[in-house]
Image (spheres, rainbow, N blue to C red):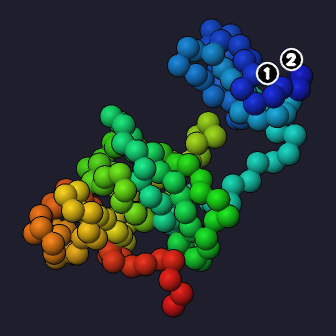
Amino acid sequence: MERIVIPGEKLGVIEQYLPGEGTYLNSSGVVVSNFLGEAISQNRKIAVKPVREVRYPLSVGDIVIAIIWSSERSQFLAKILALFKPKELLLKSPMSAIILKKTPENRAALPGDFVLAKVESFIGGDIYLTMTGSTELGVISAMCRKCNVKLNRVGYTLVCNKCQQVYLDRKISDHYGLNPFERR
């Protein structure tokens, strides 16, 4: 079976095919195309070869600046604003990303926090980030939940100078307090 398919097109069910490159398995057990391209089935596995090669402006291992904008039971939803390493680069438009809460470090942030995170993988068109593996990764800016004032770092804690609230639940980056958007 070789035919042109569009993103989101159903290619078959898990009983027929295993998902290959350029496809993913949805929650209903349906193998779905990720790209506009040619569907190729071989040995009970189906893949989609894109018409044009998909290139992300990011690579696995890049360090990015993101803001966490939503928290769900097993993951944070974030917006990537800029590339921090290998070189600083503000993105033209924010890119959505996911931080899975599978490790204590990845659970140690809250919506509204700016974080330094590493690009872990690209799966099914989604970008996955992590804050594990380095002391430079973690929260770089956070606000007090009570009075909405920027928190100050004191050792491994964050403290609000206005209401004296102490926050122990964040993974604080070595770069906490850095304003990545100001020119140096």
Q: Is residue 80 left or right of residue 13?
A: left
Q: Quick one: which residue is furthest to the top in this view?
A: 15
Spatial CA span between label 1 and label 2: 6 Å
| Cβ atoms at labels 1 and 2 below 8 Å apart | yes
96 vs 160: above or below: above
Q: Position of residue 98 (x, y in %)?
A: 48, 45
Can you tell which quarter of the image residue 87 is in? bottom right
- Amino acid bearing label 1: Ser
96 vs 86: above or below: above
Q: Quadrant of the N terminus?
A: top right
Check disc 1 and report the residue beneath it. 41
Question: How many badges with numbers are in the image?
Answer: 2
Of 102 and 111, the residue lying toward us: 111
Residue at horizontal 64%, vertical 59%? 93
Residue at horizontal 54%, vertical 73%? 85
Of 70 and 57, the residue lying toward us: 70
Residue 126 seen in the current view: yes
161 vs 2: above or below: below
Residue at horizontal 71%, vertical 33%? 34
Of 40 and 23, the residue lying toward us: 23
Q: Count residues near mark 2 (Cα–Cα under 10 Å), then give few for <14, some for 14-19, many for 20+.
A: few
Q: Position of residue 144 (x, y in %)?
A: 23, 62
Look at the numbered disc 2 and give the secondary structure of its residue: loop
Check disc 2 and report the residue beneath it. 1
Q: Position of residue 14 (x, y in %)?
A: 62, 14
